[in-house]
Image (cartoon, rainbow, N blue to C red):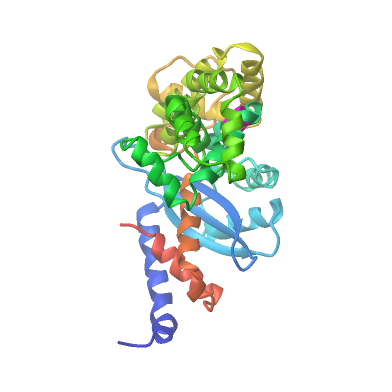
Amino acid sequence: MPDENTLRKNYLEDIYKDTLTKIREHIKDGPIWVSINETTDVEGRYIANAVIGKLDSDADVDSKPFLLNCEVLEKCNHSTISRFFDASMHILWPSGVLNEKVLLFLSDAAPNMVKAGQSIQVFYPKIIHVTCIAHALHRVAETVRSLFSDVDSLISSVKKVFLKAPSRIKMLKDLYPDLCLPPEPILTRWGTWLEAAQYYYENYNKIKNVLSHLGDEAVAINTAKSLFEKPNLRNDLAFISDNCVFLGQAITQLESQNVRLTENVSNVKKVIEKVEGIPGSKGDLIRSKLVEVLSKNKGWETICQISDIISGTEVTSEHRVPFTTNEITSFSKAPTTSVDVERSFSRYKSILRPDRRHFTFQHLKFHVVANNFEE
C-alpha cells in the first residue's frame, strides 16, 4: 500500500478532476441553481463553498446537489463572495460561462450575501436571489424564544441537570422507564428549541416530580425547581405548544431534499396562515417578525409566482416573471433553502479532524469536493 502522502500527491488531483468531469456531464448546459455560504474553520480561515444543481423541466428528475468549489477567502464581504461565485461558474463551464443559464441563487440573509446577490445580478441577468426560507422561519422561532424567558431558562437548566449525570438519569429512568431524556436543543439547529418546549409541555408533571427527588446541591437543580413553581410557566408552555411548534415542523419539511417547489411554497403559505391566527400581543410580535423576514427576501415573490404558474393557480401580481415557459417548468423541484451548502460544511469539518491539520488547503479542497460527490 503506498504511503498516504504519495496517494495525495499522485492520485488525489486526478480524483478531483474526475469528479468535476462527472459534475459537468450531469449539468451540461443547465439551467442551474447555485447556493453559496461561508464559515470559519478551526484554522481561522474564511471558507466559502459553492453547491450547484440542475434545474430540470422533468418533474420526476431530482435536483441533485453537487459541491463544485471550496476556497479560502481573504476576507468575507460582498465583493469576495461575488468573485467566488463567478470563479465557481468558470470551473463549471471552463470554455465560457453560460450566464443566462444561471437562474437561481440561494444563500442566507446575511447583509454581505444580500449585497453579493445584487452584484451578481449585473452579470447574470436572469438570476433571482432567494434567501433561505428555513433560516427565515428559524428567525421567527428565535423571536418566540425571546418572548418566553422562563421557558428558555427551564430548557437550559434541565439540560444542565442531566448532562453527564448518570445518577440523575438513573433516577429519571427508575421513576419513568418509558420517558425519554430531556432534549438538548442546539440553537444553531433550527427548530430544536421548539421541540424541547413541546417535550416539557407534554411531560410537565413527570419532569417536575423527577426534580423533586433530586437534592439541592446543584445550581441548575435549584433553578429548575424554582421555575416549576412559577404559575405562568405551564401557561407559557401551552401557548408555545398550541401556537408555535408548527414552525419547527415546517423547518424540517423545508430542509428535505427533492420536494416539489409547489409543496414548499404551499407549506410556507400555511405557516403564514397559522401565524396570522396566533392570539394576543405575543402573536403580534411573531407576525411582525415573519412579515419582516419575508419582505426582505426580494426573490421570494418571484418564486411564489413561479409556483402558482406551475400549479395552474391564477397569478395576480403585476410583477412579470422574467423566464421562458421551459425555464419556469425547470423550477419544479428548485430548492428554497441553503441547507445543502450547510451540509457540505459538516463534511468539511469532519474531514478536517485534529489528525488531519497538515493538509495543504489545495489537497483539502480536492478531498472535500470528491467526498461530497454522489452518483
Tell me where the magenta segment starts and ends, as one range.
140-145
* Residue in view at x 56 percent, y 14 percent: 276
Question: From this viewpoint, is residue 250 visible?
Answer: no
Q: In the figure, 307 relative to 67: above or below?
A: above
Residue 65: image location, x then y, percent? 41, 50
Q: Quadrant of residue 79?
A: bottom right
Residue 123: image location, x then y, percent? 63, 48
Q: In the figure, 106 relative to 371: above or below?
A: above
Residue 61: image location, x then y, percent? 30, 41
Q: How many marks?
A: 0
Q: Is residue 192 left or right of residue 18?
A: right
* Residue in view at x 54 percent, y 45 percent: 160
Magenta stretch holds residue 188? no
Q: Nearer the viewer, residue 161 or 115?
A: 161
Q: Nearer the viewer, residue 284 or 255?
A: 284
Q: Main secondary structure of the magenta part?
A: helix
Q: In the figure, 237 relative to 69: above or below?
A: above
Question: From this viewpoint, is residue 48 visible?
Answer: yes
Locate the N terminus and report the quarter of the image it occupies.
bottom left
Q: In the figure, 147 relative to 257: above or below?
A: above
Magenta stretch holds residue 144? yes
Locate the C terminus and report the quarter of the image it occupies.
bottom left
* Residue in view at x 69 percent, y 47 percent: 112
Q: Nearer the viewer, residue 33 or 373?
A: 373
Q: Is residue 52 left or right of residue 155?
A: left
Residue 24: image location, x then y, percent? 40, 59
* Residue in view at x 62 percent, y 44 percent: 219
Q: Nearer the viewer, residue 84 or 226?
A: 226
